[in-house]
């Protein structure tokens, strides 16, 4: 997983704003701290059963980034951006029929940002690094190992990277 110093050198770092930067930095800090622990955890175990808590701050930063990106590209309205009803999952889900996709953001990304590759990457990062990290379902134990948590944070960083390049963000 990248260090905060490496992230600060990315061309998009300033685009995020300090609140989103702090969230990414928090995930990086938690990952490094947990990785360095050599002590017994509660119950005498050497590891947690789920490291989703490492991903949470980065997933929140990703949500903020996507809303900002969609707003700056005029894919969503000011009301969507500042309101509490816009759902990124509905906007990005390629499985939903086009008429049910909220404001057609997935399709707008395909048209504006050099094809379907980025739209798929944004959706995959959302689904794996946000939805499957946050939600619990009785028949799906979506526990995340520490290496998987690092991979999911990297997936978010890669999605931001590719968005910044392919959508020509300045």
Image: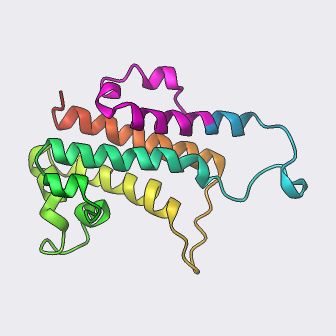
> Up-down: is 60 above or below 18?
below
Left or right: 95, with 10 as reference point: left
Name the residue nearer the viewer: 78 or 27.
78
What residue occupies the far bottom of the structure in this picture?
138
Residue 104 part of the magenta-drawn span = no
Quadrant placement of the C terminus: top left
Provide residue 70's location: percent of width, then percent of height: 19, 48
Left or right: 29, with 68 as reference point: right
Residue appearing at x 62%, y 38% in the figure: 31
Name the residue nearer the viewer: 6 or 74.
74
Where on the picture, by quarter, is residue 14? Answer: top left
Instruction: Name the dominant secondary structure of the magenta segment.
Output: helix
> Up-down: is 6 above or below 54?
above
Quadrant placement of the N terminus: top right
Provide residue 78's location: percent of width, then percent of height: 15, 51
Provide residue 143's location: percent of width, then percent of height: 62, 62
Provide residue 48's location: percent of width, then percent of height: 74, 54
Residue 9 part of the magenta-drawn span = yes
Where on the picture, by quarter, is residue 103? Answer: bottom left
Residue appearing at x 86%, y 41% in the figure: 39
Residue appearing at x 14%, y 62% in the figure: 104
> Up-down: is 169 above or below 57?
above
What residue occupies the far right of the structure in this picture?
44
Left or right: 161, with 165 as reference point: right
Number of residue marks: 0
Residue appearing at x 31%, y 50% in the figure: 121
Name the residue nearer the viewer: 147 or 29.
29
Extent of the magenta region? 1-29
């Amino acid at each position: 997983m990248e260090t905060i110093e490496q992230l600060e050198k990315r061309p998009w770092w300033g685009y995020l704003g300090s609140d989103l930067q702090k969230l990414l930095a928090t995930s990086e800090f938690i990952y490094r701290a947990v990785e360095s622990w050599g002590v017994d955890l509660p119950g005498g175990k050497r590891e947690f059963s789920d490291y989703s808590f490492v991903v949470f701050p980065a997933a929140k930063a990703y949500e903020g980034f996507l809303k900002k990106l969609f707003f700056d590209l005029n894919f969503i309205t000011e009301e969507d951006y500042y309101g509490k009803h816009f759902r990124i999952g509905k906007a990005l889900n390629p499985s939903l029929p086009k008429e049910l996709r909220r404001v057609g953001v997935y399709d707008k990304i395909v048209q504006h940002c050099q094809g379907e590759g980025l739209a798929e990457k944004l959706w995959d990062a959302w689904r794996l690094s946000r939805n499957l990290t946050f939600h619990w379902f009785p028949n799906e134990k979506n526990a995340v190992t520490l290496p998987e948590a690092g991979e999911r944070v990297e997936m978010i960083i890669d999605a931001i990277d590719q968005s910044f390049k392919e959508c020509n963000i300045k």
